[in-house]
């Protein structure tokens, strides 16, 4: 079963994709991660991508499509597309990639979020610098202030881009670049929307309900 997960950064796509990989054996196809991996491994597509990036140019849709095609062949239990497609042209390219392999999209699932609540969620995030355990200023503080619940470390860190200005820029980019592909998939009856502001377990249950329907 091949699906697309849509939603702005911070909506929880990565968390839900990890659950689907663990519980269903699906493979998350994140174009950014795949590009970095292909370049590091020196695959044929990676070599092309590296040359383009070193020239300061954007990686073409053709290169990204080739990269996805390579990984699709190993995703026998289904793929989760994250970060691709972003345009109707890419959506059409993905349809061809899938059709060439006798596959098709089952669902396009959008995690719908409230911008103000998302800003609050992201700007309050921090983690243990030692073990990586995640916390939040308001929703999940360490049981003992200044001490990690998991490893006892007293060092914490925040991502430099977890600030209000960056979050709002990401939201604007999502609305401008990714949301426009929704009508393309709505015409095909593939779009399902769920509350991305619900708990992680509730979002996972909603996704499972869609996939099992």
Image: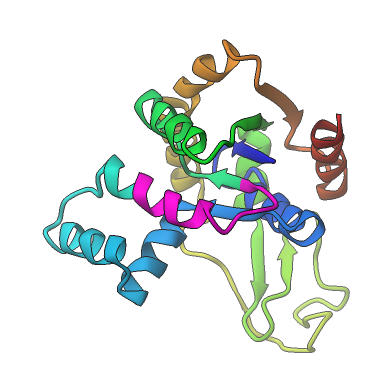
* Residue 120 drawn at (x, y percent): 66, 45
* Residue 171 drawn at (x, y percent): 49, 35
Going 74% across and 65% down the picture, which residue do you hit?
Answer: 135
* Residue 176 drawn at (x, y percent): 40, 26
Going 62% across and 48% down the picture, which residue do you hit?
Answer: 79
Colouring rule applied to residues: rainbow
Nearer to me, 2 or 116: 2
Outermost residue on the left side: it is 55
* Residue 19 drawn at (x, y percent): 76, 56
Left-right relation of 158 to 146: left
Outermost residue on the top side: it is 187
Nearer to me, 60 or 117: 60
Q: Which quarter of the figure is the C terminus placed in?
A: top right
Span of residues in magenta: 65-79
Magenta highlight on residue 39: no
Residue 52, placed above or below residue 12: below
**Can residue 138 be seen from the camera position used here?**
no
Residue 152, placed above or below residue 66: below
- Residue 186 quadrant: top right
Going 59% across and 32% down the picture, which residue do you hit?
Answer: 104
Residue 39, placed above or below residue 140: below
Left-right relation of 44 to 209: left
Q: Which quarter of the figure is the N terminus placed in?
A: top right
Going 70% across and 87% down the picture, which residue do you hit?
Answer: 154
Magenta highlight on residue 69: yes
Nearer to me, 179 or 116: 179
- Residue 169 quadrant: top left
């Amino acid at each position: 079963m091949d699906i697309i997960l849509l939603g702005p950064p911070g909506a929880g796509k990565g968390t839900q994709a990890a659950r689907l990989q663990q519980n269903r054996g699906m493979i998350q196809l994140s174009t950014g991660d795949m590009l970095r991996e292909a370049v590091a491994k020196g695959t044929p597509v990676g070599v092309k991508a590296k040359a383009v990036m070193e020239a300061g140019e954007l990686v073409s849709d053709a290169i990204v499509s080739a990269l996805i095609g390579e990984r699709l062949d190993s995703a026998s239990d289904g793929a989760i597309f994250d970060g691709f497609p972003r345009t109707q042209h890419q959506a059409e390219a993905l349809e061809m990639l899938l059709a060439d392999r006798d596959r098709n999209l089952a669902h396009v699932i959008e995690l719908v979020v409230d911008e103000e609540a998302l800003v609050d969620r992201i700007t309050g995030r921090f983690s243990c610098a030692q073990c990586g355990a995640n916390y939040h200023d308001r929703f999940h503080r360490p049981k003992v202030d200044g001490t990690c619940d998991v490893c006892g470390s007293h060092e914490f860190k925040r991502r430099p881009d977890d600030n209000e200005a960056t979050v709002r820029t990401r939201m604007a980019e999502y609305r401008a670049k990714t949301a426009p592909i929704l009508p393309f998939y709505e015409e095909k009856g593939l779009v399902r929307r769920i509350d991305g502001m619900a708990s992680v377990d509730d979002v996972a249950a909603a996704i499972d309900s869609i996939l099992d329907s």
